[in-house]
Image: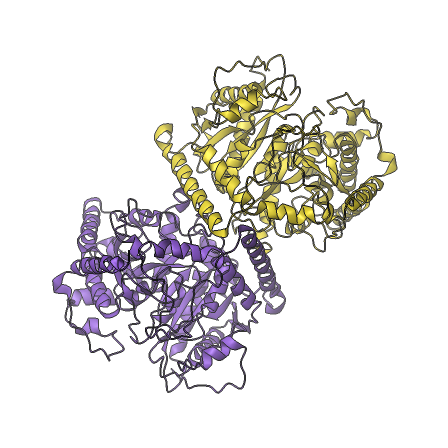
Chain colours: A yellow, B purple
Amino acid sequence: MSDNWKELVADKRKRQQDSIPREWLIKSPPSDQLDVTSIAAECGLLTDLEYEITELQDVAALLKRLATGELSSVDVTKAYYKRAIIAHQLTNCLTEIFVERALARAAELDEHLKTTGSPVGPLHGLPISLKDQIRLKGIETTMGYVSWIGNYAEHDAVLVEILYEAGAVPFVRTNVPQTLMWPETFNNVFGRTINPYNRSLTCGGSSGGEGALIALKGSPLGIGSDIGGSIRIPSAFNGLYGLRPSYGRVPYSGAANSLEGQDSIPSVFGPMTRSLSGIKAFMQAVIAGRPWSKDPLTIRKAWDNDAYQLSEHGHGKNLVFAILWDDGSVKPHPPILRGLEFAKKALLAAGHQVVDWKPYKHGEICANLGLIWSAGASEDYRTNVGQSGEPIIKSMNPNVLPDAPSFRPSNDGLSAYQLWQAQKDKTRLRKEYLDYWEASIHQTGTGRPIDAIISPVAAYAAPPHGMNKSAAYTMVWNALDYTALVIPLKMSVDPKTDVKILRDGFLGEDDQHAHFNSTFPLDDPQVYKNAPIALQVVGRTLEEEAVIGMSEVVDAAFKAHVGADAKL
Amino acid sequence: MSDNWKELVADKRKRQQDSIPREWLIKSPPSDQLDVTSIAAECGLLTDLEYEITELQDVAALLKRLATGELSSVDVTKAYYKRAIIAHQLTNCLTEIFVERALARAAELDEHLKTTGSPVGPLHGLPISLKDQIRLKGIETTMGYVSWIGNYAEHDAVLVEILYEAGAVPFVRTNVPQTLMWPETFNNVFGRTINPYNRSLTCGGSSGGEGALIALKGSPLGIGSDIGGSIRIPSAFNGLYGLRPSYGRVPYSGAANSLEGQDSIPSVFGPMTRSLSGIKAFMQAVIAGRPWSKDPLTIRKAWDNDAYQLSEHGHGKNLVFAILWDDGSVKPHPPILRGLEFAKKALLAAGHQVVDWKPYKHGEICANLGLIWSAGASEDYRTNVGQSGEPIIKSMNPNVLPDAPSFRPSNDGLSAYQLWQAQKDKTRLRKEYLDYWEASIHQTGTGRPIDAIISPVAAYAAPPHGMNKSAAYTMVWNALDYTALVIPLKMSVDPKTDVKILRDGFLGEDDQHAHFNSTFPLDDPQVYKNAPIALQVVGRTLEEEAVIGMSEVVDAAFKAHVGADAKL
């Protein structure tokens, strides 16, 4: 075995490079240029139309123009493909590139519309990027494992079948971390994906390829997966909207995955995009595709328009939002606190109520989740990584610091009986949290418990590579199976505003580590310069429709308040 | 420790005996009287009104009379309580008896109706029996474990909270097998429950107490649990309707259970009753109680009236039923085949289509389920049984035959990683089965796949004690999480009609064992004399509403055909 794996990687990388049309290569920006978000506009590769198409934010508006034939799918797909290739050259965000296949599909859709006068479905003509797990028939699925190089899929994932039926154009696949179980994006096959707002920072993970790609407007809508924050962290770190639906709402069948068979706190698929209308369009289209007839684990539950119109949340009037200022373990950094303060003011200004949310056993919930994942994780990793001889990645820090945080399992495995005890604990904690939420009915004065929680996505904005050491602010909602939608604040870290705060005490070791670290000044706003700021709106289990509806309310309040807030 | 457990049992049994009003004790029938279904009418304990009330079959009609005040809840509860105590003396079906508490609750409901003019909820005044797992605050929950004697519940199970809100009167708890994981009913605390149609036969299990009780009209509606057939087997063996809903439709939170934390193929609660209207009334009432606001594992999914009206099943016209004549492992005994033939004729006569259903990997599915359960089962049993010194029951055969079948785990436990592999296999098998079902669209000519499967509940009617050696005909639907509703055929085993068939070959060892057994003539119809015959209607995951709707169609077809079939 030995170093044979390196040859496999070299060959795979060469094949990837060869799949990029020569004429789409651009000149690299200087290596000390941290913010690369303006390159697409400057590099000269995009035509005016291509630039205009890819600058469109609103997915619903784009879908409308595609459905009427005002824009052709070929034009839209080509525009996004070129911009995706630009994004890739800047952040290394792509895995599989298949230009001809995507354009052929787009041409078929254009032909269908021309011939029949009708779009194929609700996502007609829309290019959609896919995390590297999501199998496309005939295309390799490596998911960042050297041992999976050469695995050509024999079937589309069920989600892809449904996207095809809805008229979408899957057009690229995107990078992931080895094992998927890390909130950054680096593996031995494709290397590291970086943050386009500041290339010295991580794009987050595990859906980090999507995050960097969509931030650079290389895709209008992408699909990530989230087991502990893997959609929400890269959404937040790259200034995007991203939805983590509850288990069983979006089909997973036929996709590749890590920790397969771990069904207790499983990964879910969900959309990442630059507009809330994209989140809604994706969820409506997928659910309209009756995924339960193709995936046995998807819940038979139609899109609920009453719930979307907030029938159980006062029809969107006088909502009560509970702000999680900290989770009891790590106090957020100044830019995140500024985001929470902004949210509070904006929501109050829009006529809603804001209360403080005291975290309930978040530490215990996250520890329980870690125990459940680690029950069989080491053996899973060994099985998939070990076959090729590639090393198991122990740190995503390029300098491999000795005290680098590790997301590797804390134990070498549990017995099934021990796992059951942990799962029993999880159910108890979920029951307690639900009761805790429901008990807030006595505080709101609306006759309802709080409508949603506004929570940080992480204690900090995108940190430097290898330093994203906790996913506690996202994992807790996975363990509880709550619906969570990330909203970007159109704010970013400003070292002048977001000055270091002198803490006169810490919540504990993790808090201290996040604010004072011997190897890296984790609370130095200069480090985070230009990193986007985002928050998440959290609803209860299977409240996808209502969380989207409430997020529209929140997003409108935020947008209305931007001008009003003098600080911004 | 030693034999101390026997003292605990003796005390518990004495307390149970003392909880029965002296004046409700009846004379025992002769021990050779196998059928005890006529004793209630003959024993003289019931008044005419009490007899009339308990003879009412239709739960919806009973609920109407309770809601209007035509019958008082006290009268109905007292009538059913007396008949339950009769049933208990004949079959040993009860565990917890609390007459005064139930009558006090009933009196409160009567008072409410009198004062307000409105019923408390959709189950106003209805006495409901509960399997011994379902905790009632202040009452012991032993669930058949000696070590749990003296465990008084501090909280009601969530299901009980919802039943209270709906106006029901929980009035007795019912017997179970040790560990719950056995399709008969025998434990060291309460002993054995027997079949009222033929006391030499098992009542089935694990909800066997409910089965015997409701068959003897000692309860209008009971709640059982089903992890591998535990609602459906006693429903079939005692001639009842019984529904096994999909996971997450009826709340389990706060109930006691076996194998806690085993969330992959979990137990579910569901109704058992003598009328289909009882199944519907229970499911509608529980779902209307918004159980997802109290139980985090219950799915946020309202009662779907369109689905109940068969909007996705041709509105109940020209339905296509697929008959499972055998599961590929064990061919059903003659009485069950007679039931299937009857079903076919009745459904054809009612204008529906009937096709044959070829089983798809039923053996592999059941083996996979066994592996998942056994992953931590031994340790679970040791933990709960071992504490008191009571022996783990190895056979439910009173003669403890050396080759007695055992439902004990086939291995001493798996690692969590091994369990995950088994769970991965389960998901694969569920996907394959769903595709197999959906593919039937090409055979039906209706533009839909088959609407439902008509399946045996077991390969035989209720067998002698200790001989119920397989639950394969029910377990397969648990593994697939399909909705399954048992319909009794108003037919029973008749040794003259159901003559032994000479088999000229067997499907395998299990088939041979079921038809020729050195220690017991398992295919001798004389043995099964008077045992009820039933079938199950099987729909897909989360099709509770549609399966109830289709079962009404099936039940009507069966009832219409009884006179038409000369053989009956």
Residue extending farthest to the left is: B23
Q: Position of residue A546 (x, y in %)?
A: 50, 37
Residue extending farthest to the front is: B2
Number of numbered markers: 0
Q: Position of residue B490 (x, y in %)?
A: 36, 74
Please tell me in which quadrant of the rendered image residue A494 appears.
Answer: top right
Residues B558 and A185: in front is A185
Residues B343 and A465: in front is A465
Q: Position of residue B153 (x, y in %)?
A: 28, 47
On screen, residue B207 versus residue A325, left or right, reads left
Residue under the point 70% across and 24% down: A200
Above or below B191: residue A69: above
Please tell me in which quadrant of the rendered image residue A15 appears.
Answer: top right
Above or below B513: residue A26: above
Residue B309 in view in this figure: no
Residues B93 and A9: in front is A9
Please tell me in which quadrant of the rendered image residue A214 appears.
Answer: top right
Looking at the rendered image, the quarter that the N terminus of chain B falls into is bottom left
Q: Position of residue B387 (x, y in %)?
A: 33, 53
On screen, residue A385 versus residue B56, left or right, reads right
On screen, residue B213 versus residue A512, left or right, reads left
Residue A112 in view in this figure: yes
Above or below B560: residue B303: above
Looking at the rendered image, the quarter that the C terminus of chain B falls into is bottom left
